Amino acid sequence: MRVLITGCSTGIGRATAVELTKRGYEVVATARKPESLEDLDVAERLRLDVDDDASVADCVAEAGPVEVLVNNAGFEVSGPLERLPVDEVKRMFETNVFGALRMIQAVLPSMREQGGGTIVNVSSVAGRAVAPLGGAYSASKWALEALSEGLHIEMRHFNIWTYMIEPGAIDTNFETNIRRYGVDDQPYDELQKQWDEAFDRLGRQDAPGPEIVAATIAEAIESDGTKWRWPVGADAERICGARDSMNDNAFEASMRETLQFHW
């Protein structure tokens, strides 16, 4: 089975390429900088910028028909909504949302012709619950979840299955690459401090590596389609479970109490 994965230079994308290759999949690993893939033992390594229409078209044409697409490429812009540069938020949406949509549109025609396929969108627990300073990033993931839900409904008719992967805190370099704005000065420096302390109570310091997400992606691909939201990690399971079982006010009160967050 041939699988195309976006964002394979590091973290979840790289771990997924390794995991699926071990399981016998024919993996096409992609990244904006193909030299970052040189040490990956996969079927094919291709350049791909999901923000660029031509790059997407060229990559998908070179990869040929695939049975599985894993939309993993993404990044985070963080900070109080009052101070976020709108152009930076647009750039994040270009990758996290429109990049995924470009890839979906590029592979669906061949999947329909083949009689089926699988789309895996790597969302986040942030796509189910919004953290302070994370409103814009959550908005991009909520948008991805909406696209995924629509795709799930539209594509089952064609035997094309959609899965959403919702990791919590994962030990990768993702957090070190977050673009933060407006948290170095008052009043939001205090909010950043409080939230860092609260986030640690969720177990950030004991976060699992990206391999747990890669294994979940493989499990989703190999599943029967009855489960299409896949939280990853104890924190994600706890947060998503609470979100599903409570109204908004009760959920917020529970999270504040659990995290000892008093902003």
Image (cartoon, rainbow, N blue to C red):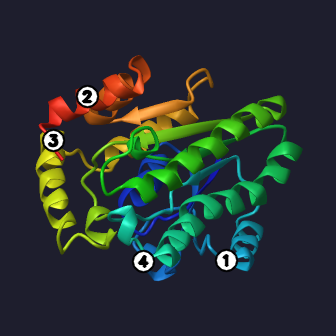
The x and y percentages for residue 231 are 41, 34
Give amino acid for label 2: Ala
User: Which residue is depicted at the point 13% across and 61% down?
Assistant: 190
User: Which residue is depicted at the point 48% across and 47% down?
Assistant: 123
Near mark 2 (Cα within 10 A), the count class, few <14, some 14-19 or many ≥20, is few
The x and y percentages for residue 114 are 84, 43
Sequence-wise, the earlier of marks 2 and 1 is 1
Sequence-wise, the earlier of marks 4 and 2 is 4
Looking at the rendered image, the disc whose residue lies closer to the viewer, 4 or 1, is 1
List the residue tagged with mark 2.
253
Give amino acid for label 4: Ser
Contact check, label 3 and label 2, Cβ < 8 Å: no
Q: Is residue 143 above or below residue 32?
A: above
The x and y percentages for residue 6 are 55, 62
Mark 1 lies on a secondary structure that is: loop
Sequence-wise, the earlier of marks 1 and 3 is 1
Cα gap from disc 4 to disc 3, whole angstroms: 40 Å
**Residue 129 relative to residue 49: left or right:** left
Contact check, label 1 and label 3, Cβ < 8 Å: no
Dividing the image into 4 quarters, which one contains the N terminus?
Answer: top right
- Residue nearer the viewer, 131 or 233: 131
Cα gap from disc 4 to disc 2, whole angstroms: 44 Å
List the residue tagged with mark 1.
52
Give residue 261's mark.
Answer: 3
Give amino acid for label 1: Asp
Near mark 4 (Cα within 10 A), the count class, few <14, some 14-19 or many ≥20, is some
